[in-house]
Amino acid sequence: MEKSFLDEVAKQLLKEQRELRHLIKENDEQFNAITDSRETELQEHAQEERDTRILERLDERQQIRLRDIDDALARIEAGTYGICANCQGAIAEERLRADLTTTLCLECSNAAEAPNQESDEISEEPDAAPLPPDLDGLDDNEVAEYLMDLVRDDGQVDTEELQLSARSGVIHLDGAVPSESEHQVLLNFLTDVAGVREIVDRLEVVRLAWERDDRSKNEQAQDVMPGTIPDQEPSGGTEDVVLSNEEGLPYEPPLSPPPPPHRED
């Protein structure tokens, strides 16, 4: 790889490195200023909590980018910059200009991303989230119980198969609801009414999900009268054996034995 190109890359990386270090220092100062505040108003406290988490996320991304830059500068120094870490082939200059810290050629990058795309999307779940002021002082179990009580009292969603839990402000929904409309009502209720910010939604929409086998059998036993077959459609058959043979109709045995013949004394 030409020395002029490597010098240009190193210059851009060093410039971005300085800017990132400056930003990280500023973020640390803002973070310290927020955590040192002694305001007691709930609304101001909630705002400070949100600002703190935003700064933490920004700082984390900046730290990752700074490590990538340091690694790229180390590769330039070692003479391995622009070599694919997977196939050891050359990375195209155009790709390097688009991402100065890339370690894979285009072919290896596409091959690595394709099989993991779905699993990456599934695993991207928030670790923590701010809660509204009225829930901020509760632990995870208390938050979950409070929200479930709200949903039950609202009465728009069947909670028989609903499982709701809380972890560090993130609400996790599991189990099932009987319709997509109730699914959307639940999500809107938690965000718009309860003020929840982050929801991990694993709910399934299963019609009559609450009718599990252990309960539906009991219900049927109560509803079905002895000697009857529920919901049986007429089949066009006959209980008369002779008529069945002559007309070719399906023979259906009677559901109860015929009455005894009348005997005259």
Image: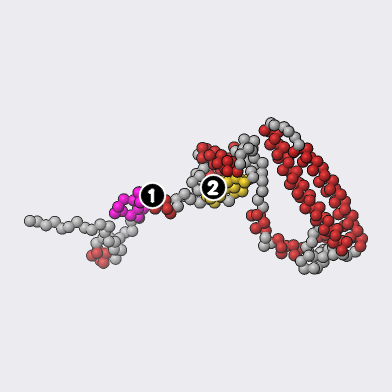
The quadrant of the picture occupied by the C terminus is: bottom left
Q: In the displayed structure, does residue 95 sit left or right of residue 167?
A: right
Q: At which x and y percent is residue 112?
A: 71, 63
**Above or below, comparing residue 101 to residue 146 in the picture:** below
Find residue 118 and name its label: none
**Residue 175 appearing in the image:** yes
What secondary structure characterizes most of the magenta part? loop
For image coordinates 87% across by 64% down, the residue present is 79
Residue placed furthest toward the left = 265
Query: Callout 1, which amino acid?
Result: Glu
For image coordinates 77% across by 68% down, the residue present is 87
Identify the magenta region. Answer: 219-233
Q: Quadrant of residue 123?
A: bottom right
Please tell me whether mark 1 sits on a helix, a strand or a loop.
helix
Is 146 or 114 nearer to us in this picture?
146
Q: Quadrant of residue 133?
A: top right
Looking at marks 2 and 1 on the same chain, the residue that comes earlier in the sequence is marked by: 2
**Location of mark 1 (residue):** 219
